[in-house]
Image (tube, rainbow, N blue to C red):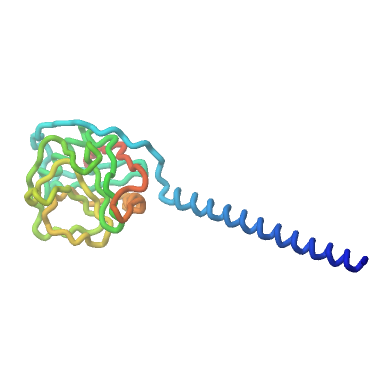
């Protein structure tokens, strides 16, 4: 009788230990999952911001004030960090002139990167945030015939119905080694600083080319020299 009682006690203790181990494993698993999730969510290091309201704007095409060969840099501050664009005033003076005009007007402030295609491009500059908006005017300037849209190149977006070199306000930055696009998209320049920030934004894209979270262009400042 005593041996039977001891045996039962041993069995109960063993089962109790097994139960405790299972519960602990579940809790650890959940904790690890949450930690991984948090790491993934914060991996890009971008601030969480609310989606801005669409803007209704209409400008007239600006006069040419940018001089060919002038050294200009666009400093793009975003909710993911800052990157700089060396503007190509030699190869694209008219397009750069329009971009500079809009930046100085504060047009880009508060707009989003509405299209993020991983390994391809990030695209922003639409006041409507849908990919269909513009500044109220367009500029025509064919890009160099030998232009290759390689990593870090910044160019203007257009619809397939528009002629080569036409642009409004939407621009894109190439993420991949070569986007494989024909030379039909007006040139702005090349990312000169902060390409890692551009890649950080690119990490927040999806196969549907929609951002996982809102990425805002806080301000674009034009610097000379």
**In-image side of 49 versus 225 (left or right):** right
At horizontal 30% and vertical 40% (from top left) the residue drawn is: 217
| Residue at image point 26% right, 37% down | 221
Q: Residue at x 56, y 55 (%)?
A: 32
Q: How far from the left and from the top, in percent, is residue 195? A: 31, 52
Image coordinates for residue 1, horizontal then vertical, percent: 92, 66
The answer to whether 58 is drawn above or below residue 129 in the figure is: above
| Rendered location of residue 125, percent (x, y) | 23, 41
| Above or below for 155 versus 216 | below
Question: Closer to the camera, 201 or 24?
Answer: 24
Residue 140 falls in image quadrant: top left
Question: Total number of numbered labels?
Answer: 0
Q: In this view, does 138 lie to the left or right of 54?
A: left
Residue 144, image x and y in percent? 10, 55
Viewer-closest of 214 and 61: 214
The residue lying furthest to the right in this view is 2
In the picture shown, does residue 138 fall above or below 38?
above
Most distant residue in the front direction: 1
- Report which quarter residue 28 is drawn in: bottom right
**9 with respect to 152 (left or right):** right
Quarter holding the C terminus is top left
For image coordinates 93% across by 66% down, the residue present is 2
């Amino acid at each position: 009788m005593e041996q039977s009682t001891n045996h039962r006690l041993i069995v109960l203790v063993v089962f109790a230990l097994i139960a405790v181990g299972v519960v602990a494993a579940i809790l650890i698993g959940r904790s690890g999952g949450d930690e991984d999730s948090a790491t993934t969510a914060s991996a890009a290091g971008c601030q969480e911001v609310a989606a801005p309201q669409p803007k209704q704007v209409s400008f007239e095409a600006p006069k040419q004030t940018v001089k060919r060969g002038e050294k200009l840099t666009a400093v793009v501050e975003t909710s993911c960090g800052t990157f700089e664009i060396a503007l190509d005033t030699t190869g694209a003076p008219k397009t750069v002139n329009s971009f500079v005009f809009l930046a100085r007007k504060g047009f880009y402030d508060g707009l989003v990167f509405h299209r993020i295609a991983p390994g391809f491009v990030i695209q922003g500059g639409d006041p409507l945030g849908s990919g269909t908006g513009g500044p109220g005017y367009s500029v025509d300037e064919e890009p160099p015939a030998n232009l290759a849209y390689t990593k870090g190149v910044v160019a203007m977006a257009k619809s397939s119905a528009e002629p080569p070199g036409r642009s409004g306000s939407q621009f894109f930055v190439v993420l991949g080694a070569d986007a494989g696009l024909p030379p039909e998209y007006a040139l702005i320049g090349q990312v000169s600083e902060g390409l890692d920030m551009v890649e950080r934004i690119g990490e927040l894209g999806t196969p549907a080319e929609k951002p996982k979270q809102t990425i805002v262009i806080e301000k674009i400042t034009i610097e000379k020299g």
